Image (tube, rainbow, N blue to C red):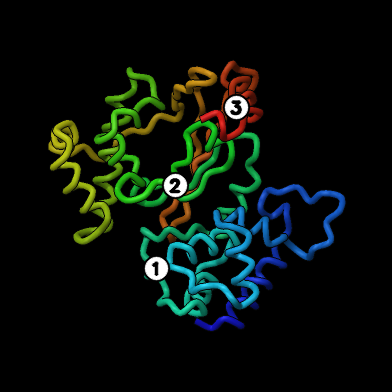
């Protein structure tokens, strides 16, 4: 671990970011060049004290998951992320499609989407980043660990995971999730996360085993997604996607019909904030 170089790298990248780059208000009394340490710490999901000690060359060696969070919070490119890992004394993450690192450009788009739910999905159905409205609509899916990170696993093993969708859509959603997992399995091959999930689900879910045996591929996706929310009731949202082909990440943007009841409910969710979940 090269503490002086790590501290210098973190400081320069923090100072290069402006509040508007990450969806934060600038405010009238800002004197700091770039972001404040507490702002970066919040973006990384860690305490200000922990992040501050890293910049002051006196923190502990960060773990690989912690470095991944710092890379996302500072909106680092893949090359910058690899450099960060090396400075912290770790090997660079293998650049495979299942990487958790979200492209800086994709994060900049996400940061600017403040009035509609948006989230970045990884290649096996794991949520990598969410804006506040997506948190209010879906809950914090980025905090999940283990196989629970993956939507298909939650769908077939946790009945509560289906409460986000109306009951009449459950069969359709389950088949779509299974088809998405089959696509990931065929793409990533043996030894992949997708293979592990398939093997686990075949053991744990009779429903998944039945759907999997039908070998459906290329399942037609519906542009309109229907949701059930405990605080505001049913919503109908149009789903648009932006693909990062290098990492195979997808930015999903959920928008209501202008002037619709769903638009009014989404505005209420925006006011309520993530605590609505």
Q: Label 3 neighbourhood size at 10 Å, few (<14), some (14-19), many (20+)?
A: many
Per the rendering, the mark at residue 269 is 3
**Rendering quarter of residue 263:** top right
Instruction: Of the two numbered discs 3 and 1 on the same chain, state the one appearing first in sequence.
Output: 1
Q: Nearer the viewer, residue 42 or 218?
A: 42
Determine the secondary structure under disc 3: helix
Direction right: furthest residue = 28
At x 57%, y 53%, the residue is 107
Q: CA distance from mark 2 to mark 1?
A: 23 Å
Mark 2–mark 1 contact, CB under 8 Å? no
**Rendering quarter of residue 175:** top left
At x 54%, y 63%, the residue is 70
Q: Which residue is mark 2?
A: 143
Q: Which residue is mark 1?
A: 95
From the viewer's perspective, is 250 left or right of 217? right
Instruction: Of the two numbered discs 3 and 2 on the same chain, state the one appearing first in sequence.
Output: 2
Instruction: Of the two numbered discs 2 and 1 on the same chain, state the one appearing first in sequence.
Output: 1
State whether residue 160 is above or below residue 24.
above
Q: Label 2 neighbourhood size at 10 Å, few (<14), some (14-19), many (20+)?
A: few
At x 14%, y 33%, the residue is 206
Residue 47: x %, y % from top left = 58, 57
């Amino acid at each position: 671990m090269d503490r002086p170089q790590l501290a210098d790298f973190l400081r320069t990248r923090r100072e290069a970011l402006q509040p508007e780059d990450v969806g934060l208000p600038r405010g009238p009394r800002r004197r700091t060049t770039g972001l404040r340490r507490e702002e970066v710490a919040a973006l990384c999901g860690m305490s200000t004290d922990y992040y501050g000690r890293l910049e002051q060359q006196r923190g502990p060696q960060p773990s690989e998951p912690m470095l991944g969070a710092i890379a996302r919070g500072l909106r680092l490119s893949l090359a910058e992320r690899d450099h960060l890992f090396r400075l912290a004394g770790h090997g660079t993450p293998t650049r495979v499609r299942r990487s958790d690192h979200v492209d800086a450009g994709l994060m900049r788009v996400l940061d600017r989407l403040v009035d509609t739910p948006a989230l970045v999905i990884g290649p096996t159905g794991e949520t990598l980043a969410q804006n506040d409205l997506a948190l209010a609509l879906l809950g914090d899916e980025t905090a999940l660990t283990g196989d629970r990170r993956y939507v298909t696993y939650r769908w077939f093993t946790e009945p509560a995971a289906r409460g986000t969708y109306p009951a009449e859509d459950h069969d359709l959603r389950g088949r779509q999730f299974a088809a998405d997992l089959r696509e990931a399995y065929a793409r990533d091959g043996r030894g992949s996360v997708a293979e592990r999930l398939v093997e686990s689900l075949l053991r744990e879910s009779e429903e998944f085993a039945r759907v999997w045996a039908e070998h459906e591929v290329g399942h037609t996706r519906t542009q309109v997604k229907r949701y059930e929310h405990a605080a505001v009731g049913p919503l109908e949202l149009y789903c648009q996607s932006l693909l990062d082909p290098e990492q195979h990440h997808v930015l999903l943007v959920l928008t209501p019909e202008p002037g619709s009841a769903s638009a009014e409910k989404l505005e209420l969710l925006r006011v309520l904030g993530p605590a609505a979940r």
